[in-house]
Image (tube, grey):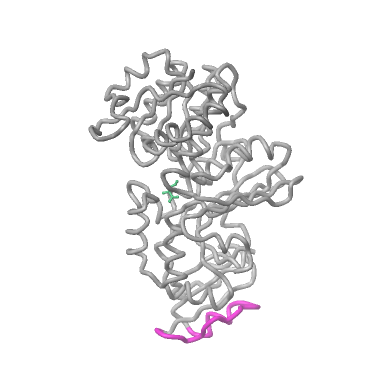
Amino acid sequence: MVNVAILGFGVVGSGVAEVLSTNSEQITRNAAQEISLKYILDVRDFPDSRFKDCLVKDFAVIEKDSSVQIVVETIGGVGVAYDFTKRAILAGKSVVTSNKELVAKHGYELLELARERNVNYLFEASVGGGIPIIRPISQCLAANEISELYGILNGTTNYILTQMIQNGVSFESALREAQRKGYAEANPSADVDGTDACRKICILASLSFGRHVYPESVPTEGITGVTLADVGFAERAGCKIKLLGRAIRLDDGRVACYVAPHLINEANLLANVEGVFNGIVVRGNAIGEVMFYGAGAGKLPTASAVVADIIDASKHSKTRKYLNWMDSSAEAQFDPATIENRWYIRAEAGSEAIKMFDAAEVLSCNGSGNETAFITEKMSKAVLDSKLKGFKVLSAFRVLD
Ligand code: HSE
């Protein structure tokens, strides 16, 4: 039997307890032993919970209990979650987490610590909610040199954009609905300003390219600048606007990551990833292109990934899963502003803005409010900025080619 402790009885933590209990037969069969929930740590009281007998308030109880082999960290953030994770690993316990902020910020250090202590630090649920993506990249695609990853990595913003595109719903009311459904972060600005997607692309890039990519090195733009006017012009161009995290590796090994809204052609599979769903495309030199799709947020989908890691950790109690990368280095990075794309532009300008480009596709010229919208030929951000110098640009989004 393997004893488990859950740290944090919020949306994901309570989902993990529920899945462990509801699917216990299946889980026991897959783990080839019983997985028993021994403790739940939370500062709050839950007198009506069916798990109330497991609740404790002092982490030391879990830390000192040598019968607890696996700790599930679903507290979130980089405060006590970081402290408890280190203490659990130092106490010889494997740690399983959905905490993308912690993995993106301290993943290298925590993986090193886990390696030294011969325990596992697993984080399948940190990217893509219930979608299997960490294990496929580290195992199923291990024979490939990965050159690029990109995808819709945040369910809340995809839900909001879908509501804007399909129903003309306002940003604010779509966000409120996402919060009500338990998709959004505790502070939803991390969703809408792209921070959450940034953390996730950092984790995927670190795993795929072998060096830690820290969030502060990743230019990040969220969806607060996307308007219903942009949605309409994108539709005129046969595209949908989606927030993408993207990581590219050049032949010389240098890597660039960024997060930004993109126009995606309606025929592209990613354009049809709607609502809270996420879609992630991985390009490898043997596999070609492969796409992962599924529920990117929510209590039970995320718990599904956490519990899969619990099963994996229980099966590898005496061995380590190969999950490691090196620390970052400035020489291993290049500036994503040099990546060439076509660009969607909406500007407070007339045809003079369009004339700056050799082959602009005009979507609207001198429309309402003297607005002009068009799509440029391929160029870097620096070239784009030099051409549009002096014009009042309202929106500038990359087109995914
Ligand atoms: N707030 C996140 C999202 C939760 O909306 O995708 C899952 O990481």
Q: Residue at x 25, y 35 (%)?
A: 48
Q: Residue at x 47, y 16 (%)?
A: 92
Q: Nearer the viewer, residue 309 or 225?
A: 309
Q: Please indicate whether residue 338 sits to the left or right of residue 88 in the image.
A: right
How many discs appear? Answer: 0
Q: Please indicate whether residue 263 sits to the left or right of residue 50 in the image.
A: right
| Residue found at the far front of this picture | 25
| Residue found at the far right of this picture | 286
Q: Position of residue 222 (x, y in %)?
A: 44, 58
Q: Quadrant of the C terminus?
A: bottom right
Instruction: Based on the picture, tell me whether residue 358 belongs to the magenta stretch.
Output: yes
Q: Please indicate whether residue 55 sits to the left or right of residue 34 in the image.
A: left
Which of the 4 image quarters holds residue 4?
Answer: top left
Q: Position of residue 183 (x, y in %)?
A: 40, 50
Which of the 4 image quarters holds residue 11?
Answer: top left
Q: Position of residue 158 (x, y in %)?
A: 47, 59
For residue 2, above or below residue 337: above
Q: Residue at x 55, y 45 (%)?
A: 131
Q: Residue at x 54, y 71 (%)?
A: 344
Instruction: Based on the picture, tell me whether residue 68 belongs to the magenta stretch.
Output: no
For residue 344, above or below residue 75: below
For residue 335, above or below residue 327: below
Magenta residues, start to end: 350-369
Q: Position of residue 117 (x, y in %)?
A: 52, 17
Q: Please indicate whether residue 118 sits to the left or right of residue 57 in the image.
A: right
